[in-house]
Amino acid sequence: MTTFDILAQQLVNGLVLGSFYALVALGYTMIFGVIKLLNFAHGDVYMIGGFVGFAVLSLVGGLVGTGWGGIALSMFVSMIAVGFLGVVIERIAYHPMLAAPRLSILITALAVSLVLQNSVLALTGGEFTAFRTNLGFGGIALGGVFITYNQMVLVGMAAILMLALETFVTRTQYGRAMRAVSIDKDMCRLMGIDVTKIIAVTFLIGSALAAAAGTMAGAYYGSIWYFMGFLIGLKAFTAAVIGGIGSIPGAMAGGLILGLLEAFGTQIPFIGSEWKDVFSFSILILVLVFKPTGLFGKSEVERM
Amino acid sequence: MSAGSDILLQVEGLEAGYAEIKALLGIDIELRRGQIVTLLGANGAGKTTTLKTISGLVRATRGTIRLMGEDITGTPAHQIARMGLVHVPEGRHILRGLTVQENLELGAFAERSAETRRRQMDEVFDLFPILKERRKQDGSLLSGGEQQMLAMGRALMQKPKVLLLDEPSMGLAPKLVTETMKIVKRLNEAGTSILLVEQNARVALRLADYGYVLETGRIRMENTAEKLREDSSIIEAYLGE
């Protein structure tokens, strides 16, 4: 393999990883937008998404198969179920805390994270669960670079979801309202927008995207466990910060950038792949120090 | 009250405040169909709080607010807006990052039909042609005068029966103040009843039918705009000019 091939291969790996990060980061950033909460339970929502997708696939796999068709169906069901779980979490845990100081709701998010993790821990006994699928290992070779069909489908599905989201936030009244609520809640109320409902819709969509990523990750890596959301939650947070927290295009870009940086980072001499988390979080610190508003973040300047 | 059907907005004994501080200590206001009524007073007199309490942003601790005879005290702000009482807040509050067109579209959030929204937007563009030119631009990057037009245009997207305007002339050049007041007059002539808060008492009294002078959370004086206009001592004593 030439150096070029190695880098090209890492580009592919980075895109796959970045797709997961981006999907999870979107929920992070959207929820931060509407209620200014760093939802530390969001990674665990992704984990629940993986388990729900697994459960659905176990039920319907016999009928529709466990190829990408069955996985797509399970993913869809998981998105709906976990989307509503997100709404319920907001209702029960966050909504009563909206008027409280910011720290209270942050601690609540940590509590929700523990509740979700420990529920699954209790159900699975902390064991890895094999996510059995019928995915092949086929792919195409482009020069020295091998891209599996699985990677293509996965990046494609993530792209479709992100395009759908982009269309929603720019072309529909609810999408515009979501952006508006993240800017000025009182003004939204004066325009007849039911802010509570928009917050619920945001949790629905953000959680559904995390569930999609969770199901795809389970199918792609072949196993799921109760702690799988922890690291990706932190990575998604990093991605959201890189892109500028609160910015939807920023989360997409930040996710992809982080995925690519990590993939390429494994190729730096003397820094093996075991250092990739250190690498990511160093980037987080650098962004926070030198450009805290991120790539797409806006500084808070009010015009009179 | 015999002329009850004529009263669009009736506020009685309104009290409200923030945390420990009571900002309103019993306010009575009436707005009749077709009128422009102005609230005058120095900074901190409670004008803005009065508007915010009427539109539901601030909770009334006492008293009642009736819109077209219906008690709306304690009704959530977004529902009040949908009933036809539209509040254009101080400082305009243009949604940053959204285009002029998106700001207007959201003004008619409760309107389901995109067709109706487009028609209403065309009406707003007729009134403010500059907004049509700038429709693809970020609303927060418009000049102060244009932002004021956008704020009013956005309010008109909701087809208001009652319009609450909080300091529409704030921060505008004198020429634009005159322009803004002409627009207020025109909206009124088109059938919208208006409750106008203004720092600039002379400008407001030229426009209004009736005026209230607020001082530290109470109505200190009320009369027809004509009478208030004649009495220059009022302006000096209560409006600090």
Image (tube, coloured by chain):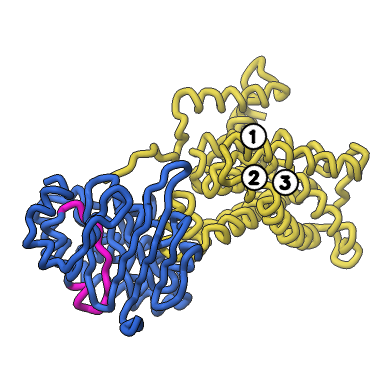
The percent coordinates of residue B157 (x first, y second) are: 35, 70
Residue hosting label 3: A46
CA–CA distance between discs 1 and 3?
A: 12 Å
Residue hosting label 2: A24
The secondary element bearing badge 2 is classed as helix
Could you tell me if the residues under marks 1 and 2 are in contact, i.e. CB atoms within 8 Å? yes
> Between residues B134 and A275, which one lies in front from this camera angle?
B134
CA–CA distance between discs 1 and 2?
A: 9 Å
Mark 3 or mark 2, earlier in chain: 2
Instruction: Please state which amino acid type lies under the numbered disc 1.
Output: Lys
Instruction: Please state which amino acid type lies under the numbered disc 3.
Output: Tyr
Residue hosting label 1: A235
Task: Note the chain letter of the yellow one.
Answer: A
The secondary element bearing badge 1 is classed as helix
User: Residue B115 appears in which quarter of the rendering?
Assistant: bottom left
The percent coordinates of residue B66 (x first, y second) are: 41, 71
Tell me whether marks 3 and 2 sit on the same chain: yes
Mark 1 or mark 3, earlier in chain: 3
Q: Which residues are magenta?
A: B186-200
| In the image, residue B159 above or below residue B96 | below
Q: Residue at x 17, y 49 (%)?
A: B238
